[in-house]
Image (tube, rainbow, N blue to C red):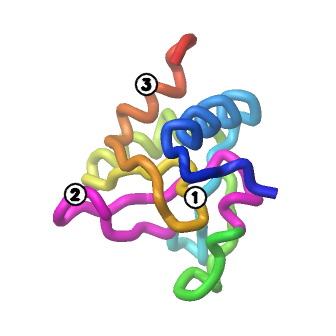
Amino acid sequence: MSMLTDNLDANFQLFIEQVRESGQVWGLRYGEDWVVCRSAEFEDADVMPLWSAELDARQHCVEEWADYEPAAIELEEFLDIWINDLDDDDVLVGPNWNAELEGHELEPIELAKALVELDA
């Protein structure tokens, strides 16, 4: 059962805690393609939704994303490669979006900082 709620700040904090513990970030992937969608907050911006648990990612594999599957990204790879690539492509990240696809949208470097800060 998902631990995500309508409390977006709590969902973000859960993301940080679970990713630090598991060492994995989850996205949705179909072949070589990853889910990226339009931002709800920023005009002309794209967001890559990410989750801290496979179960939470899997619940979004419906409708237009029905062909996608949850895929793990090791935290070290995410921090070393993905953060820079997403930033270079001007893609925001959406950690732990809930079932209604609600959640924070932030710059990849801000997420990286939160993941490596000891008292974030």
Packing grade of label 3 (10 A; few <14, some 14-19, many >=20) is: few
Q: Is residue 115 left or right of residue 59?
A: left
**Residue 14: horizontal and vertical position, in percent?**
64, 36
Q: Is residue 28 left or right of residue 102?
A: right
Q: Nearer the viewer, residue 77 or 117?
A: 117
The residue tagged 3 is 113
- Distance of mark 1 from mark 3, alpha carbons? 22 Å
* Front tag of 3 and 2: 2
Chain-order first, disc 2 or disc 1: 2
Q: Is residue 13 left or right of residue 74?
A: left
The residue tagged 1 is 98
**Residue 103: horizontal and vertical position, in percent?**
46, 52
Give the amino acid type for the residue marked by disc 3 in the picture: Lys
- Whether residue 51 is in magenta: the answer is yes
Work out which residue is located at the far left of the displayed protein and give it.
43
Q: Which residues are magenta?
A: 35-58
The residue tagged 2 is 42
Q: Residue at x 68, y 42 (%)?
A: 24
Give the amino acid type for the residue marked by disc 2 in the picture: Phe
Q: Is residue 8 above or below residue 35?
A: above
Chain-order first, disc 3 or disc 2: 2
